[in-house]
Image: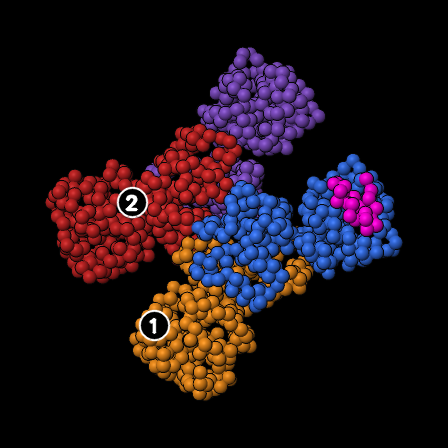
Chain colours: A blue, B orange, C purple, D red
Amino acid sequence: MDRTHTVGFIGLGNMGQPMARNLLSAGFRLKIYNRTASKARELAGLGAIEVPGPADALDPDGIVITMVSDDAALNMVVEGTDGLYNSLGPGAIHLSMSTISPATSRRLAEHHQQLGAMYVACPVLGRPEAAVAKRLWMCLSGPAEAKQQVRPLLEAMGQGTCDFGEDPGAGNVAKLASNFLILSAIEALAEAFTFVRKNGLDRATLADFLTQTIFNCPIYQNYSRLLLAEDYEKVGFKLALAMKDLNLVRDAAESAQVPLPMAAILHERLLSSLARGRGDLDMVAMALAVSEEAGVQPAGRTD
Amino acid sequence: MDRTHTVGFIGLGNMGQPMARNLLSAGFRLKIYNRTASKARELAGLGAIEVPGPADALDPDGIVITMVSDDAALNMVVEGTDGLYNSLGPGAIHLSMSTISPATSRRLAEHHQQLGAMYVACPVLGRPEAAVAKRLWMCLSGPAEAKQQVRPLLEAMGQGTCDFGEDPGAGNVAKLASNFLILSAIEALAEAFTFVRKNGLDRATLADFLTQTIFNCPIYQNYSRLLLAEDYEKVGFKLALAMKDLNLVRDAAESAQVPLPMAAILHERLLSSLARGRGDLDMVAMALAVSEEAGVQPAGRTD
Amino acid sequence: MDRTHTVGFIGLGNMGQPMARNLLSAGFRLKIYNRTASKARELAGLGAIEVPGPADALDPDGIVITMVSDDAALNMVVEGTDGLYNSLGPGAIHLSMSTISPATSRRLAEHHQQLGAMYVACPVLGRPEAAVAKRLWMCLSGPAEAKQQVRPLLEAMGQGTCDFGEDPGAGNVAKLASNFLILSAIEALAEAFTFVRKNGLDRATLADFLTQTIFNCPIYQNYSRLLLAEDYEKVGFKLALAMKDLNLVRDAAESAQVPLPMAAILHERLLSSLARGRGDLDMVAMALAVSEEAGVQPAGRTD
Amino acid sequence: MDRTHTVGFIGLGNMGQPMARNLLSAGFRLKIYNRTASKARELAGLGAIEVPGPADALDPDGIVITMVSDDAALNMVVEGTDGLYNSLGPGAIHLSMSTISPATSRRLAEHHQQLGAMYVACPVLGRPEAAVAKRLWMCLSGPAEAKQQVRPLLEAMGQGTCDFGEDPGAGNVAKLASNFLILSAIEALAEAFTFVRKNGLDRATLADFLTQTIFNCPIYQNYSRLLLAEDYEKVGFKLALAMKDLNLVRDAAESAQVPLPMAAILHERLLSSLARGRGDLDMVAMALAVSEEAGVQPAGRTD
């Protein structure tokens, strides 16, 4: 890809904004669009060109990146009145990085193909701070040629990419599987911490021990820290969004007819948290219900 | 502790044997006992002294290590006719390394104390190959003075120790919490692999990706490998023993009144595996039921 | 309501057909419509008037009954090109008897009201044989005036009606709650039967005892009989449809933020049954998985 | 059996007392024993003979009834220092009516047989008010001859008996299966009531409807009433005892290798209730946690 080429970038939320900034830093020229225009200001100051609608972000044979909140938002961006389908032409590439269902990726890919364009799925693993630090991990899938062309863009946004093949939904499946494993680890840690706490042990001692030995990996290290901090008001990723992601997992599991008992546990846990008004807290606030079911009132709990 | 001092070692199974061998290599003198005497032969060839009963392994003010299969076996070793209570005297230390309930540790510690002796809990994390390689992790608890004295022994058997305080049951609680987290991770991985498989992805690609990035720790690396190998006949740790360990977790959780929904899932999973005659397979054979519930017949399955 | 008035009836499946027949027997005149016209033949022979589309079944200020398979089918009947919205006028009543979501009832009711028409929800409890025998139970809700007018129709089709108030979705909620309780009872019975069977007891003895004493009600009596018969090929209600109903329950529970752990169990059970290719068997075939997880191979099982 | 014969009765709690009274009313002569002697006073006033220990309640070839709180209490009554084994001789019959494990029944039956005595299991279904009203249902098993001899006694205490065969544990298995079904029904009702409540329906309307139609049986009628009353301080059967009974179910299920997912749900529910200090409330207080998980604060809740 020629770096002088201009790339479209749609969706400038907590994740999209730092990703777009990293592309600008790497020398890419960007046409940017966000539903709420104010979010585009800062990037415009760094040289990005604001455009009035999704369709305007894409040169007919260019590349456009979407990083929006859910399937409905993506459908609007692509199929809406001023959506990508107004400008998507032969040779164009749509690099779809949002966390959405594999079904949506497969459906869009098929329609793109009819227009001669290519759809590449590449959802990311990592919270906003990882996006800032260019430390995202990426789950890529789609046509080989298109994947080849978007490589320099991915390298400017993350620390590594895994190729899950040609199926446009595969990258999304891998992302959903990862999210499921992360949520399962959080629930297991929350249960284990409550178990040792009611047995009189210091949770931090256990956390230090395990995350330096058999569980010395980012997920267990980060979430142990967050769980012990019990600072649910400091929101990295909203609990309500974790429910959205889990429902994507469960829908994909239902389509493929795969019972996931642990996802069922997670669903009850998150739904109960929403019912108690915790949707806007950080997702680790799901641990509150683990404590409460054991009769433990967490320190500093305000509800 | 004087290294010329003789230490008793009771229980020479898959774990006890390599642990005792490492003590001999480190220069300790051992008096060894095993219910099935044949297992003691090899160590005798390396200089260990075979004794006819548990009580004979312990000098009245000495140190004795127990590494037996369960609570019942330990009770027999301690309270049986030729058990440790025949020789346990003031100043003696019982270093109890088996995976047993915190309740048993607490009960024995109290009785030991009445005799002037000290009880130290120190169950270990690691499979037999880790014991051979001196790579065990250890969960220590008990009286400070006794913990200090057994340090050189622990250093000769493992790669690190975490001190969970004075409560004689604390080391056991930490070990059980670790086992619970390991089993939860295996179940979550098995569900995730079945999920991506039925969605047409290659499981190994996902496993490689995750265990090099956000889950790059021994538990996820080892169990991903074992799950993908689907070689359940090669037994590192029997499924029936995993059930025994899980029941220790559940009993301790019930005593402390801590609901553990994930442990409930694990229990159903393992019980179903036992019901299908898989108790003698490796514990990762619990994944067979995950596949079966999704209508997937694993390659090479023979039942 | 004047019995000489003509009533529309849309949806002549296993349930709709006997319900319409009972209306004819009671002296009502019917205009009937079914997507697959062949199903209307028999009723035409009994005096019903076949019409070419849903809109034709309804006089502008008349009453029309819908008894279709799901939300999508009802939306098509109401909002489709030749749908009810072409003829629904002031004073008209739509008596909606399908098992659908409360959300769909509420949405349609609002739109009907804008047209001056009234929406009455009245889903039914009972299998096709109950419909034939006029033994359906009915969950009614909607505007008082409309409920009054449809009374004679309901009396011609069932043995009793419960009024759940004005909320157009209330009847659906009550129906879904009933379905949830029925499925829970089936799962509990299947587990109990497997429990006593593996303990060497005769299941029929337990079933006879319980259904003559503390559980002497139709649900426990009928489903005990069906579970013990193990004749899953004789289909009263397809397992795939039970899953559809359960998903209505779960969707409504998620909207209202109500965790239902038992519904989660039922979902895993039915999804596993679908994954094993049992969607076209009777819903009691969900018991097969209960047996299999306990290592019991049911007599006569063919897969 | 000669009604002039004297029968022993051991265990005069909430259940045993009215059962013994009904035997006296029917003309039986009783020798009674209770650990707490005060409870025997009232019956002594009605002609029963107080004896100092369990062994004294039994003529060597007579009949003795036990109705105690759990396995441990029964073991004490039978095997304790002044226990039944001091007087149990050839021809004697032990009618064991407590809710205990099948394993205990089988073990005692074997030992009784060695003494020439017979063991008959006959646990009962019904709360104390049913015992008073002679409306208990009974789950009988044991040797045919002994069952024949105890018939007149059973007829004096209950309204019906079901014979589960010769296996001395079978009656207990049937009783445990019944308890499991009752608890499952309560949990399902509690979830359904919360579901309709949060959807704006009146729970009592639903309860009236269902318990007059498809669920018109004592369990659904009684527990709907109790659940809606929300009067957990009026204790018919303590929540802590429901946990005891459920654990008997789960132990028997584990021995027979039968996964019971619904029992797992019930266990988490009851354990959470105990953790919140509700063990002394009526068992229907398990519904509090169902409400709380849905964010509903029950009226009049004080904790």
**Secondary structure state at the residue bearing disc 2:** strand
Q: State which region is magenta.
A: A31-52
Q: Chain of mark 1?
A: B
Q: Residue at x 81, y 48 (%)?
A: A45
Name the quadrant containing residue B220: bottom right
Q: Amino acid at mark 2?
A: Val
C285 and A167: which one is in front?
A167
Q: Is residue A256 visible?
A: no
The stretch drawn in magenta includes residue D292: no
According to the picture, the residue beneath numbered tag 2 turns out to be D124
Q: Is residue B16 visible?
A: yes
Q: Which mark is residue C27?
A: none
Q: Residue at x 69, y 45 (%)?
A: A69
The stretch drawn in magenta includes residue A44: yes
Q: Amino acid at mark 1?
A: Gln
The N terminus of chain A, quarter of image: bottom right
Q: Residue at x 33, y 70 (%)?
A: B111
* Residue D108: x %, y % from top left: 26, 58
Q: Are marks 1 and 2 in contact (CB under 8 Å)?
A: no
According to the picture, the residue beneath numbered tag 1 turns out to be B113
* Residue C267: x %, y % from top left: 54, 44
**Secondary structure state at the residue bearing disc 1:** helix
Name the quadrant containing residue A224: bottom right
Q: Chain of mark 2?
A: D
